[in-house]
Amino acid sequence: MSHVHIIGAGLAGLSAAVEAVQLGHSVSVYEGAAQAGGRCRSYEDSHLGQIIDNGNHLVLSGNTSVKRYCDAISADGFHIVETARFPFCDIKSGARWAIDINEGRFPSWVFSAGRRAPGTTALDYLPGLKMLFADQRAVIADLLDQASPAYTQFWEPLILAVLNTPLDQAAASLMRPVFTETLMKGGVHCRPMIAHHSLAEALIDPALAYLKSYGAQVHFGCRVAGLIVVVACSAICLPGDTRT
Ligand SMILES: Cc1cc2nc3c(=O)[nH]c(=O)nc-3n(C[C@H](O)[C@H](O)[C@H](O)COP(=O)(O)OP(=O)(O)OC[C@H]3O[C@@H](n4cnc5c(N)ncnc54)[C@H](O)[C@@H]3O)c2cc1C
């Protein structure tokens, strides 16, 4: 087994470290900040006297990567909301509506005017399927009708929230796993998961405890400034060299 060095104790670094110790490797994590969590960290706000998350995080119940990670570190810090109902508000017009996704796989919610975006029809949701089959270069805005109410009232806010990228720059293929793990499996897989107390308690502290229990070293205040790659080998084989 090898010794694995991981730079950064954000969610990516921590989940990599968790998988590495599960595979039997010893692990060192180097984190530049004084705490773990990266963009998903929590901190104590001395003014409010409270633990504050670095921004709201919404995870959906169908997210298999988060589930696998939480199972691995025995974390149970999320409350799963019982319905997949998402309130929307148009700040310009003040209009409010809710997308209310039914439990099962068949998307009956798109056939119910009260459960879909106002001014849309069931057919307006069909073009979303194009994202499932889009090639790597396809951009989402090119696949959807940007003038349609479904674009402004459903696709754009949904995809912007997921990818944090304007739709004229966002790769359609990135939405494929999101749709296959959530919307296409029905509302049971689209339920919001909200951290009981803080993101750190739900996702970060249990991972640090888990890594510690496996003897992994997590070094804080340790910013990696560069890597020196040393290639060690006993012979260099040139084309035509028949030595093995
Ligand atoms: C306000 C906000 C809201 C969000 N909402 C959601 C949401 O609702 N749902 C969702 O899924 N995602 C959400 N995200 C995104 C999510 O937080 C990030 O995708 C995720 O935390 C990124 O994890 P990461 O480990 O890849 O990177 P980061 O969290 O950026 O972690 C990288 C870590 O590496 C460290 N590091 C960097 N360089 C070095 C170096 N040279 N040496 C040592 N350490 C180094 C950094 O200090 C940091 O701790 C949100 C993010 C923000 C900011």
Image (spheres, rainbow, N blue to C red):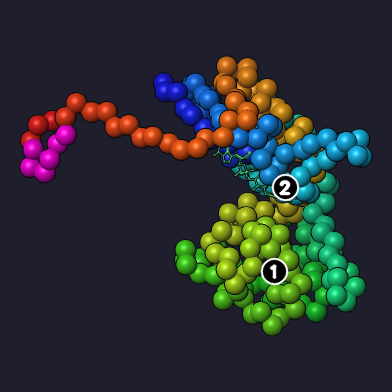
Position of the N terminus by quadrant: top left
Q: Image point 66% across, 46% down: which residue? A: 63
Q: Image point 36% across, 35% down: which residue? A: 229
Q: What's drawn in magenta, residue-wise?
A: 236-241
Viewer-proximal residue among 137 and 61: 137
Q: Mostly what secondary structure, the magenta segment?
A: loop
Viewer-proximal residue among 23 and 186: 23
Q: Image point 56% across, 76% down: which residue? A: 142
Q: Quadrant of residue 143?
A: bottom right
Q: Indicate the amino acid at tag 2.
A: Val
Residue 72 in view, yes or no:
no
Viewer-proximal residue among 8 and 110: 8
Q: What is the distance, in whole Å, between disc 2 and disc 1 at their CAs?
A: 18 Å
Which mark identifies residue 59? 2
Ranked by sequence position, the earlier of labels 2 and 1 is 2
Give the side of residue 174 with respect to residue 119, left or right.
left
Q: Secondary structure at mark 2?
A: strand
Position of the C terminus by quadrant: top left
Which percent across, then down, holds residue 238? 12, 40
Which mark identifies residue 119? none
Q: Secondary structure at mark 1?
A: helix
Q: Is residue 150 above or below residue 185?
A: below
Residue beneath disc 1: 155
For this orientation, the residue located farthest to the front is 225
Residue 230 in view, yes or no:
yes
Q: Quadrant of residue 77?
A: top right
Q: Image point 75% across, 78% down: which residue? A: 149
